[in-house]
Amino acid sequence: MSPPMARLVLLAALLAGCGGLPPTPPDGGAPDSGVVTFTDGGFDLNDVSWLLPLPSPSQHGQLLGFTAAGSRGPLLPRSLYDSLPGLVESQDAALLFPKFRVVSVRIDPCFPKEPSSGCIKQLRLVAQPLIVEALQTTTEDGSIHLFYDLSDADFDSARQTLTELRHLAAGATDGKPLDVHPVMRAEGLTGPYATTLHAMITRLCGAQNLTRVAFMRLIQTNVAWRFGALNVEAGALVADPIPRLGTVTQQGVQEFGNTDFRSGELQPAPGGDQLPVLLSESELRLTDTRTFERAVTSALQIEHPARTNPKTIDCASCHVASRALHNARMERPFDTSTHADAYVGNPRFDLRRVDGVGDDPRAMRAFGYFGKLSALSQRTINESAEVAEALSR
């Protein structure tokens, strides 16, 4: 299938597969008016995925905490938080609870139910603990990912807010790569844009429609991390087996290297996948061409929203693929521009990964912060492009 046709098929799946409502056009036109013509190109990456700026040390309350609540209850009930494993080594989980703040938000028209059967509309939040070091706000190296299911009416309400936010952005998001949000960085977290975004979150998200909680735990500073996910069932968290790992419910990454010489591994690694080759400098140098090409293909498929999804790929592989792939390019230069599994996307989007953390192998974040530096995965960027394209049609 050609790349343009593949994109059309994926867009159809994002909307039709989810039973999506006709998109509300950014110019405020009627959602059921048939073919919509956009005079401004439609939504862009930073219109559907939001990385909020870190506030000043005295203003952490400008970002939403877990107790923030609308009619659907708090974003994360304390009882559910208390049932999670410890998220930062040697730190009291109870003392961390009030430090967590929502640092990123994404709208998802099609989070998969199962590997190949339907999908769910969602808003997704990522929260990290904020702390102060050297008179600056920074983050602890742990995170919680919250998933809220949306009804058709909820999703339509969210889409109306996206239209309002696009008007408030006044073109500032057009053609920009995904990173710290340009409008909120300029206006601050008490400006009209952030206020409108936060109001949408508390209106549509809460304990009543929270269905899934994922986490990244710091086991040993700059060396070892663990990933896992749990489903909310009857008011409790139930561990969800990690895809490709059988009954395993937590997966680790260990990294003894640095940006110049990587020495990492997945614990456990999925059977038959060569991606771990890209995590080790010594393996990169010694492995045969065929194995290396299979490792590159695996990383590209992880970055491609139409090749893999959260129900078919394991947590750790998803979080390490982008930086591992870039590291491989430095060690063994190769061209993926014509590779069948390389994501292309609409040329109107700037798909570059320009996060502040770059290729530090210790940065396990897909859409958040490593310390005070923004940290993204290429998959998050590519998924944002697909969502923006889908909601623009």
Image: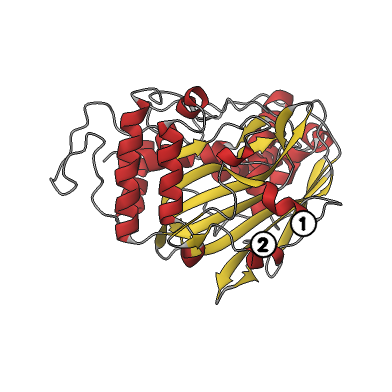
SS at badge 2? helix
- Taking 1 as reference, is 208 left or right? right
Residue 204 in view in this figure:
yes
Which residue has dot 2 on it?
81
Residue 316 in sight = no
Contact, mark 2 vs mark 1 (Cβ under 8 Å): yes
Residue at the image point whose x is 77% and y is 38% from the top: 287
Image quadrant in which you'd find residue 388: top left
Q: Residues within 10 Å of mark 2 (few under 14, many from 20)?
A: some
- Callout 2 amino acid: Tyr
Secondary structure beneath dot 1 equals helix
Report the residue that reaches farthest toward the front.
Answer: 58
Name the spot of residue 366 as percent of width and height, x first. 61, 41
- The residue at 71%/26% (across/down) is 332
Q: Residue at x 41, y 61 (%)?
A: 119
Amino acid type at circle 1 is: Ala
Judge by depth and name the residue closer to the eye, 51 or 296.
51
Left or right, 359 with respect to 353, comes to right
| Image quarter in which the N terminus is found | top left
- Of residues 387 and 163, the one nearer the viewer is 163
Q: From the image, tell me which residue sits under label 1.
A: 93
Q: Residues within 10 Å of mark 1 (few under 14, many from 20)?
A: some
Q: Earlier in the sequence, mark 2 or mark 1?
A: 2
Residue 111: image x %, image y %? 45, 56
Distance between the alpha carbons at the discs numbered 2 and 1: 9 Å
Residue 28 located left or right of residue 341: left
- The residue at 69%/47% (across/down) is 99
Q: In which quadrant is the C terminus drawn?
A: top left
From what the image shows, is residue 255 above or below residue 229? above
x and y, in percent, of residue 325 in the image: 65, 34
Residue 58 position in % (x across, y down): 66, 33
